[in-house]
Amino acid sequence: MDRLKNWFKSDSSRGLTLIGLPFGFSLLLLAAPMLLIFFLGFWTQDYLVLDRSFSLDNYIEAWTEPMYRDLMLRSLGISATVTLGTVILAYPMAYFISFHGGNRKALWLFLVTIPFWTSYLLRVFLWKVILGYNGVLNSTLGWLGMIEEPLTFILYNANAVIITLTHAWAPFAILPIYVALEKIDRSYLEAAADLGDGPLKSFLRITLPLSMTGVVGAALIIFIPTIGDYVTPKLVGGKDGLMIANMIQVQFMKANNAPLGASLAVSAMGIVSMISLVFLALNRRWLRKRGS
Amino acid sequence: MTEKLKIDSIKNIVELDGVEKHFGGIAALDGVSAQIREGEFFSLLGPSGCGKTTLLRLIAGFEQPTKGNIAIDGFQMHGVEANERPTNMVFQSYAIFPHLNVEENVGYGLKRLNLGKDETARRVNEMLKLVDLENYNKRPAHALSGGQRQRVALARSLIMKPKVLLLDEPLSSLDKNLREQMQVELRHLQRTVGITFILVTHDQEEALTMSDRIAVMFEGKIVQIASPQELYSRPKSKRVASFIGVMNFIEGQLLKDGGQVTTVDVGILGNVNVNPDQIPIPLNPGPVIISIRPEMLTLLFEDRDSTEYEISGVILESTYYGDMTYYNVQINGLKSPLTISMRNTAGRRVLGDGESARVGWGAESLVILKNSEV
C-alpha cells in the first residue's frame, strides 16, 4: 500500500498523469483509425457489404495497376520538387532573420506568419487568379509585350501544384531552419574568419553543416504532408496534376471501394516512411562523415 | 641581416595609437595607446566592462575602431578584415567547431593553403604534440574536456603561425587546479613558440604569473603598463594598488621633497624617510596616501623580535589559509584596521581574536600615492 502511495508521488507517475490524457486522445483519434485503415486494406468491398475475410487482392492491385504507380511517382516527384523549392526559398529568409534581424527578429517571424491569416483555400484560389489564362501574370506579361499568347503551362498541371504548394509551405520551412541557425554560436563564425575564411567559405564550412539539422527537419515537415495533399491538386492541378491522395479520395467516396483506398493509403504511407528513413540515415551518415 | 636583427630586438609588433571605440554613443575604449613588443607575453588586465575584450577584438579585426589606428607588424590595419590579419584568437568559449573532430579543427585554417594531405597531417600532428594531445586526432569535439578544448583551440591558432596570438580569458572556464596548471603551460608554450601573446584577463594572479608586461585598464583607458613586479610593488595609483592584490592604505602627509630623500609623516607612526622610487608619480608636499602590502607588515611574536619601526594594536580577526594566516589588526590611532599576512612556519602559533599584537614594518616597503578617492 505504501509502495503504491510512493509511486503516486514519484516523478514517473506525474509524467504519466500529464501525458495520459493527450496519449489517450491520440490513441483514440489517431492510432485507432489508422489500425482500422490498415485492416480495411485486407478486406474486400462487395457492392454494399464488406467481406471481412483476409485478402491481398487490394494490395496486388495497388502495386501493379500502372495508373496507381504513375500517380504515386508523380506525387513523389511533385513533393520532392516542392520540398527542394521550399527549402531553397526558406533558407535565405531564415538566414536573413537570424543573422541580420537585429532586435527585430520577433517582428520578422511574426510577418512570416501573415499568410496564415487567410484560409488555405483562399490562397489556393488566389494562385488561380494569378496563374490563370486571363490571370494577373499572363495579362501583365502580355501587356508588357513579353508574350504573344497566354502561357498555359502554369495552370491546371503539375507546375501549378508545385508553385502553390511551395508558396503555402515556405513558412513551415523557415522556422526549423531559423531555429537551427539561431543555435549556431557566433564565435564559430568569428573563429572561421580568424582562421582565414571569407564569408562564403565560412558559410559552406560552418553555417551550412551546422544548420543541416534544421534543413532536414524542414524537408521532412514539407515532404510528408505535401505528398498526401489533395485540395491543391484538385483546385489547380487539372487532370495532369492529380496526386495519389486524389485517387484515395475517389476510391473512398465515388468509387465506393474503401478497401482499395485503404490499401493505397497504407502503401503511400509506407513509401513515405521508407523515403524519410533513408533520408534521415543518409543525412546522419553525411553529418558523421563531416566529423560530428 | 645584422641590421634587421638589431631592429627586431626592439620591434613593436602591435602599435595602438589613440584607439577609440564607441557603441551607440558610449565609449568602450577611450583613447588607448600602447606598444606591444615582438615575442612578449602581454596581458590586458581589468575588471569586467573595462574594454579589454573590445580592444582584443579590434586587434583581431572583428570590430573596427571608431577613431585611432592599429598597426600590426608595421602595417596599418584599417579596413583589413579579420581573415586577412596576421593574428589568431583563442576564444573564451574556445569555439571548437562541433561538427569536426580534433584534427579537422586543428587543420581548419591550413585547408585554404592547399598544402596537400601529407603536409597538413604532419603539421597537425606536430601541433597536437606541442599541446600534448597526441593520438587525439579522431576524437570528436563533443568528447573533449574543458582543458582539452583549450589545447585544441591553442593548436588551431598556433598552427597558423600568427604574428600575434590573442587570448580572450582562456582560463576562466577551467577549475582552479587546471587553471593553475595551464598558467604554467601557457607561459611555457609561449616561450617555446616565441610568438607574441596578448592575453585578456580579469584575474590579477593570472596576469602576474604569466606576463612579461601587464596593461591595467579601467573604464576604457590604460592606466598603467608595467612588468608584474613593478606593477605589484610600485602601483601608480590607489586604484591599481587595490586591484592588484591586497593593499593597506594610510593617510599621511608628504612633508619635504628633498631630492634623494623625502620625508613623509605617517600620522601617528611619525616621520619616515623614503627613496624617490617609492613615489611612482612625482607629488607635491601635502596630503598623500601611504600604501603597504600585507606581507610587508610583520607580527612580532617574541620579545627579542624587532624591526625598523614598530606599532601596537589588537587582532580583530584572523583567517587561516593553511600556508598563510591573514590578520585584521586595529592599530591604536588609525581609522581603519590593517591587513597583515603571516606565513605559518613550524612552531609559530596563530594569534586569536582580541589578542594584542606588535606590528613591525620597514620604511623601504612603503609606496606613496596621490591622495584621491578612487
Image (cartoon, rainbow, N blue to C red):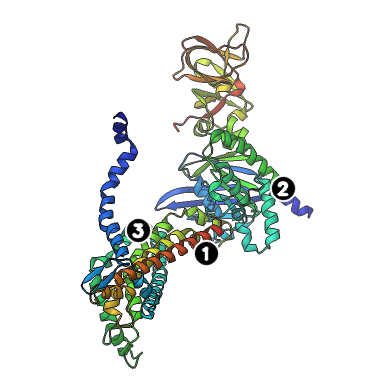
Q: Is residue A189 above or below residue A87?
A: above
Left or right: where does residue B94 sit relative to residue B192? left
Amino acid type, callout 1: Leu
Inter-mark Cα distance, 1 to 2: 42 Å
Residue at figure coordinates x 49%, y 33% from the top left: B239
Residue A127 visible in the picture: no
Inter-mark Cα distance, 1 to 3: 24 Å
**Residue B163 % position (x, y):** 64, 53
Inter-mark Cα distance, 2 to 3: 52 Å
Marks 2 and 3 close (CB-CB < 8 Å)? no
Closer to viewer: mark 2 or mark 3: 3
Q: Quadrant of the C terminus of chain B?
A: top left
Q: Quadrant of the N terminus of chain B?
A: bottom right
**Residue B161 % position (x, y):** 66, 54
Closer to viewer: mark 1 or mark 2: 1
Residue B308 visible in the picture: yes
Q: Which residue is mark 1?
A: A204
Q: Nearer the viewer, residue B98 or B281?
A: B98
The chain that hosts pointer 2 is B
Q: Which residue is mark 3?
A: A105
Q: Is circle 1 on the same chain as circle 3? A: yes
N-term-proximal mark, 1 vs 3: 3
**Residue B364 % position (x, y):** 62, 23
Q: How many other residues sit within 10 Å of disc 2, few (<14), some (14-19) or many (≥20)?
A: few
Q: Is residue B298 above or below residue A292?
A: above
